[in-house]
Image (cartoon, rainbow, N blue to C red):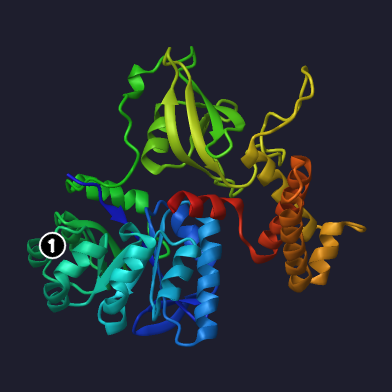
């Protein structure tokens, strides 16, 4: 049995989240906050539809997608207003896992093959409103798309007889029984639409209902029972928490059986507080959630290692890591490349948010984008000149200068190192 996903959708119209395709009443003015809300409440994926009709609104929607991607830990799929290949590129570069081509439009049908070859089949989804389009374009879709988005309550049994491509159903139904019926269909990998996108939707609670109906929902699944772990005399197991990108050790905490099960089920790190004698979801009050990426046990099965995506600071003091007070040891160079890049980026971001008199970084921000671009161009030229010199020291110096100015540009335009490394990893 395949896992199923709960995928809320956000419809963006003129920079706001609206109710539905045929109902443009505003439900949220802060689109990014709404996306974060869904992610934090346990959604598995997010679909963003750009309903813009003007180039200006289109660019605003893309900028919002870029911001959403920085603040959520779940995959984002984007569609709407794709009129040319460049729009597909913009959605993907904004952080979308896949771009949705609307097959009710001839332009989308004509560009499917070319965008699939350019960006990869796995980055392209096709949306359909009726079975007729699926019949006519079946071979094209199967060759060049990796997912179907059904925008109508179709006869799913008929759909499954036509194609084996996994599909997500976007529906306006508000009936729970109909949602369960859709999820039970063998070819459906997820459901989206008005019911799933309710602001007060309890995703974890609804997944429990689905499980009771025999539907296997997307979640982490432990291959070990908690009873197989070796606990301390208090019935707890220590958990070392590490940043999944940099391997930085963030904190040490403890779990009991309930905390362990909640972590595995929800994907959010949950611990047992020895002082308060109660469960606590990391970040529930501060917003500094930890999203689980992997959980491993040591050779003696008495310590867990959790690799997480840390939002904000891990330590209650406001420090990134709880381990910041050195008590013994020698100074050494920190040469982990990503840590260095993230550290310099963080310093530049801090200068932008908290200007410091006499700072060269603030001078660049004050002068604006044209000055920053001019410096990036100048430093790129300096690399070319240095490369003609047999002494590699000059090249290292100039590349370092170039990367610094590029990071200023990244901060100015809201691009992070995670955006860059994710883009490189997906190419």
Q: Residue at x 47, y 49 (%)?
A: 425
In the structure shown, which secondary structural element does the residue marked by tag 1 occupy?
A: loop
Q: Residues within 10 Å of mark 1 (few under 14, many from 20)?
A: some
From this viewpoint, is residue 349 visible? no
The foreground one among 262 and 52 is: 52
314 to 227, vertically: above or below:
below
Question: Is residue 12 found left or right of 273 in the rendered image?
Answer: left
In the image, taking residue 70 as reference, residue 258 lies left or right, namely: left
Determine which quarter of the picture holds residue 219.
top left
Task: Name the residue: 69% across, 41% down.
Answer: 340
Q: Residue furthest bottom?
A: 54
Taking the image as drawn, is residue 340 in sight?
yes
Residue lying furthest right: 358
Position of residue 283 in the picture relative to residue 270 (left or right): right
> Where does residue 242 sit, x and y in percent of width and height?
55, 32
In depth, the one of 22 and 231 nearer the eye is 22
Residue drawn at the location 49% of the way across and 16% of the way down: 234
Residue that label 1 marks: 163
Check the picture and name the quadrant holding the N terminus: top left
């Amino acid at each position: 049995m395949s896992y199923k996903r709960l995928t809320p959708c956000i419809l963006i119209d003129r920079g706001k989240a609206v109710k539905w395709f045929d109902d443009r009443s505003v439900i949220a003015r802060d689109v990014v906050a709404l996306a974060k809300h869904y992610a934090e409440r346990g959604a598995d994926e997010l679909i963003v539809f750009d309903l813009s009709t003007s180039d200006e609104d289109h660019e605003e929607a893309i900028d919002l997608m870029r911001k959403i991607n920085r603040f959520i830990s779940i995959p984002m799929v984007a569609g709407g207003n794709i009129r040319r290949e460049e729009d597909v590129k913009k959605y993907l570069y904004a952080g979308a896992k896949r771009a949705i081509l609307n097959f009710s439009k001839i332009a989308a049908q004509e560009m499917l093959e070319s965008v699939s070859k350019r960006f990869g089949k796995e980055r392209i989804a096709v949306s359909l409103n009726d079975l007729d389009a699926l019949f006519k374009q079946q071979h094209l879709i199967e060759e060049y798309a990796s997912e179907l988005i059904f925008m109508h309550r179709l006869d799913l049994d008929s759909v499954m007889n036509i194609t084996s491509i996994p599909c997500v159903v976007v529906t306006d139904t508000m009936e729970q029984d109909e949602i369960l019926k859709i999820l039970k269909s063998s070819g459906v990998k997820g459901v989206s639409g008005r019911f799933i996108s309710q602001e007060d939707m309890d995703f974890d609670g609804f997944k429990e209902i689905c499980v009771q109906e025999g539907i296997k929902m997307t979640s982490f699944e432990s291959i070990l029972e908690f009873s197989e772990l070796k606990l301390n005399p208090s019935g707890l197991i220590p958990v070392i928490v590490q940043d999944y990108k940099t391997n930085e050790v963030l904190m040490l905490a403890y779990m009991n059986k309930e905390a362990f099960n909640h972590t595995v089920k929800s994907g959010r790190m949950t611990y047992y507080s020895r002082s308060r004698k109660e469960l606590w979801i990391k970040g529930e009050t501060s917003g500094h959630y930890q999203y689980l990426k992997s959980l491993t046990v040591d050779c003696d099965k008495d310590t867990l290692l959790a690799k997480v995506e840390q939002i904000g600071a891990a330590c209650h003091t406001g420090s990134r890591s709880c381990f910041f007070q050195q008590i013994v040891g020698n100074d050494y160079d920190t040469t982990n490349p990503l840590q260095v890049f993230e550290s310099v980026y963080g310093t530049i971001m801090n200068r932008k948010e908290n200007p410091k008199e006499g700072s060269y970084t603030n001078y660049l921000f004050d002068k604006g984008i044209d000055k920053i671009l001019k410096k990036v161009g100048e430093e790129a030229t300096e690399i070319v000149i240095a490369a003609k010199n047999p002494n590699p020291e000059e090249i290292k110096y100039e590349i370092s200068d170039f990367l610094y100015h590029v990071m200023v540009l990244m901060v100015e335009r809201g691009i992070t190192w995670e955006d860059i490394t994710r883009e490189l990893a997906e190419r």
